[in-house]
Amino acid sequence: MKLTVPHLGHMDIFLRAMSRKVGPDFVFPPKTSSRTLLLGNKYSPESTCLPFKFILGNFIEALEAGADTIAMITDHGPCRVGMYDVVIQQILKDLGYRFDWIVMDDTRLWNDYLRRFNRERKKKGISFWQSLQAIRFSWKKVRLCEEIERMAHRIRPLEVRRGETTRVQTDCLRRVDEAMDDKELDSAHQACLKKFHGIEKDSFRNPVKVLITGEGYMVINPHANQDIVRRLGEMGAEVTRTMWFTSQIAYALHLDLFNPKSKRKAIRASRPYLQHNLGGECNASIGYPVLFKREGCEGVIQLHPFGCMLEAVAKNILVRVSEEYDIPILTLSLSENLSETLIETRLSAFIDLLYKRRGRNRDR
Amino acid sequence: MKGYLGIDVGSVSTNLAVIDESGQVICDQYLLTHGQPIQAVQRGLKEISSCLSKDVEIRGVGTTGSARRLTGLLVGADVVKNEITAHAMAAIQFFPDVRTVIEIGGQDSKIILIRDGLVIDFGMNTVCAAGTGSFLDQQALRLGIPIEAFGDRALLSESAVRIAGRCTVFAESDMIHKQQMGCHLNDVIAGLCEALVRNYLNNVAKGKDIQKPILFQGGVAANPGIRKALERELGMEIHVPQYYSVMGAIGSAILAKERMDGSGPSQFRGFGIMDLNCWTRNINCKECENTCEVVEFIMDGKPISYWGDRCGKWESQARKF
């Protein structure tokens, strides 16, 4: 079995670490590129949401690379992710690909996924304890990847030479990915800290703090959001993201009960505006700005994939949140037909607005 | 005398303005870009240098508009800023109590909300360019009416026809349909103006709290038909500033003045660049899956700069020159 999954944050690093220890074999799609989107666009219904097109493109490229089994999550409720599973399967079949399909959601978790995993484990003769260790190690790895990203978010607005942080980040992620055991991972961690420390910084700058919220796929994946985190960083803003691969897993497994800024808390914070939980990230998108405003966040950017109904609901409610909490909110509607200039102009105008609000001129 | 130069290179027009120490406009220029930003800026510099008196010394340069980056490199700008900030700066300078700025340019339209001299919110057209200058230009050309007279024709209309203005293609076919039905041309033009204004208010200005006083700037502000339709639709009075077509350039000159306040000499390359041979070359970087389209800027046969790369590799190379 050669399993594949779509790209989602650092999920590939997590699963690669798992597969090295216990299996199964993975064939990851090549990094999402303009070709991925081209393929996705070509075979998707025209009006579907952007993540659908990326994911379909990922699957086609993975099948081309030799994958024979696809794992895809699904959901219930108004979010269209619930139909991804069925529709993508049908499109790929119509294209003539042959593959096995594993669908994952909370009701089928045991049947489809854990049982298969267990079977694979037994086939390879790996003990239960070993596979637990593998999960722990992979989790640690992906946590470290996200910490590296957070460090990059903090340091990028301070960097003196544009692009240095991004290069260090890419390099560090590669090192973490290559680490085979705890010892190597620890030394990679140390090396990363040293590298980030070595970046030449202008510590007199006081960057504005911007929160990126909105639909999860768009927030997590730089290829989907036009690399907004890097762009904002280079414009001199310190970025915080609401959504991470680990936070999504933690939410699904109820591991985030004590995290003050979890999705669960965000949904609770959205209650004064929206009592009913609509699903997707709608409620969380409304609640996160409330939580992060308390942390000193100065502006919010909501990412709205063109055609996403849930984020459109959130967008209109966010106007009220913006007024009541006195925090500027910019909604970016993202689709595949988006000019870079437009994004660049809006982001820089938004950053100017935030600096002007502070009552001092931007020093850059 | 000290002067500050602002250059706004947009899709349709290239505007230049020089202001003095007190913010007064010494001289301004409005030219058409004709799809060649470098040549347009060079032409503009030629014109503006001939209208400036000899004793004006350029102490700072700012660029804005969609070609701000390219222009910044060409002239050696001290500040490169987006057009929203630039337009707001100019509006606040001339009308300190302004609360709403409506700007309709060649390819994009914006709304800027200002309270107490501070930008608090803005909007820009996202999905479609219906309702911008280019489309009006196109229609004026099709009907054989000079664009300067287009708006006046709308004022002559007694009852405007209804045109669907959601999309330029449909608006055009709707206009043709009405004209073939025998509607008077003035009524069709008035209908178009109303459709564009409706489209602007329903897309760009949707959900924005529009308050008086309102400034209307950008090239389309020259069109009295649009002006009248906006006033009627909003039920509020609209001011068109004297320098409505070059407000972006004035704004970036103001930004340059602010930046250069108390700092060293300007990076301005001087008016000599209008005679230099400058061009750009596209490079498709194939180093990684991003496949960035990198632009190489060549001045007088020497590469000056690179941009468009996500990783900064090309850009750092440029620093060596």
Image: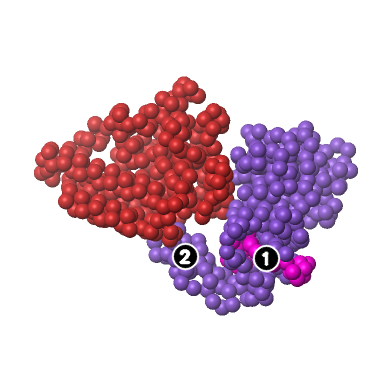
What residue sits right under mark 1 in the picture?
B58
> Which mark identifies residue B315?
2
Percent position (x, y) of residue A153? 40, 48
Whether residue B65 appears in magenta in the rendering, the answer is yes
The amino acid type of the residue labelled 2 equals Glu
- Quadrant housing the N terminus of chain B: bottom right
Residue B107 seen in render: no
The amino acid type of the residue labelled 1 equals Ile
Percent position (x, y) of residue A271? 45, 23
Chain at tag 2 = B
Labels 2, 1: front one: 1
Question: Viewed as shown, does residue B217 lie left or right of A355?
Answer: right
Stretch in magenta? B49-78
Residue A361 seen in render: yes
Whether residue B268 appears in magenta in the rendering, the answer is no
Residue displayed at 39% across by 48% down: A154
Q: Secondary structure at mark 2?
A: helix
User: The chain drawn red is chain what?
Assistant: A
Percent position (x, y) of residue A67? 29, 51
Chain at tag 1 = B
Colour of chain B, in one word, is purple
Q: Which of the two discs, 2 and 1, labels the residue nearer the N terminus?
A: 1
Q: Nearer the viewer, residue A14 or B242?
A: B242
